Image (tube, rainbow, N blue to C red):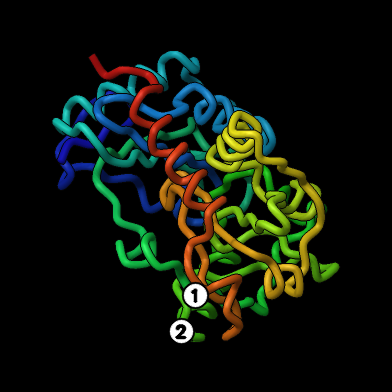
Amino acid sequence: MKIWLDGELVDEANAKISVFDHGLLYGDGVFEGIRFYERRVFRLEEHIKRLYDSAKAILLKMPWSEQEVIDATLETIRANGLDNGYVRLVVTRGTGTLGLNPMLCETPSMFIIASTITLYPEENYKKGMALATCATRRPAPAALMPQVKSLNYLNNVMAKVEAIQAGALEGVMLNEQGYVAECTGDNLFIVKGGVVITPPVSDGALDGITRQVIIELAAENGIECVEKSVTRYDIFTCDECFLTGSAAEVIPVASLDGRTVGSGEPGPVTLKLIEAFHALTLKSGTPLD
């Protein structure tokens, strides 16, 4: 495997960063996860724009232009000979000293990994997956803005552990007011009376790229979609539920906390949006050739 590291492609075994890198020491950095299908990178420009927004929010000055990052991403995929897969793009604060002061870091460091990914078993995409509510809450905006895709992911990791210990593959995270924010790595949607509903970003949801794609596809297919606060009760009593994410794509939900969601199987609205999503990914995106 070839890894893009600070301007050059290196073998996986040589893709190393310093133990004094603040991304490692303090989770000080940002990242993006991007899918590519049939040699087309899906929503590449949107992902890179969000990467720069995250960097700006934490005062991390990017030494590369957006076009240079786009070119590096495409170069990495090509170097690994992949037609379909997943890109993880990580920017750290760079090498510094022991101590929190980010101003002592020399220059940001970036690496890009292009590989394959299987987030959940195929069976879950066909039959739906089980969710569990996590005790760990989504950080409040005053603590860390939910829109920043930072390397400080311990909050999500611990929530994921809770979900797994409860026998689920994914967990629902609530905000401090008790409303659903999102899952540990995915956005959440429910369907009630034919209307698609998803928590607003103000409730702690990441403004996901795939989330926005589904909102667009719902409109194109004549399906009403609204953003409003969602509770656990709303999930318990909805007709359908599904999750979205760049890595997860679109995956139906069968249960939450032991309660069957809807019929317990993927519903018609979910299936229609999944079909529309897959069709879109195969005909749009930034070409590798």
- Tag 2: Cα neighbours inside 10 Å, few (<14), some, or many (≥20)? some
Q: Residue at x 50, y 45 (%)?
A: 272
Height in image: 187 above or below 109? below
Question: Which residue appears farthest toward the right when viewing the image?
Answer: 177
The mark that comes first in sequence, 2 or 1, is 1
Left or right, 230 with respect to 74, comes to right
Where's residue 205, x and y in %?
A: 69, 51
Which residue does the numbered mark 2 point to in the structure image? Answer: 167
Type of amino acid at the residue the image marks with label 2: Gly
Query: Is residue 89 in sight in this rendering?
Result: no
Kindly identify the residue that appears in the image at 37 percent across and 37 percent down.
35
Quarter of image, res 10:
top left
**Residue 194 visible to the viewer:** yes
Along the line of sight, the residue nearer the viewer: 282 or 41: 282
The structure residue drawn at horizontal position 58% and vertical position 45%, both measured from the top left corner, is 149
User: Where does the image place residue 252, in percent across and percent down from the top left?
Assistant: 49, 60
For this rendering, which residue is in front, 82 or 214?
Answer: 214
Q: Nearer the viewer, residue 138 or 251?
A: 251
Quadrant into which the C terminus falls: top left
Residue 58 percent coordinates (x, y): 66, 39
- Decide: is 157 above or below 59: below
Q: Which residue is mark 1?
A: 130
Tell me the tag on residue 188. Answer: none
Q: Which one is in front in this view, the residue at disc 2 or the one at disc 1? A: 1
Name the amino acid, label 1: Ala
Q: Secondary structure at mark 2?
A: loop
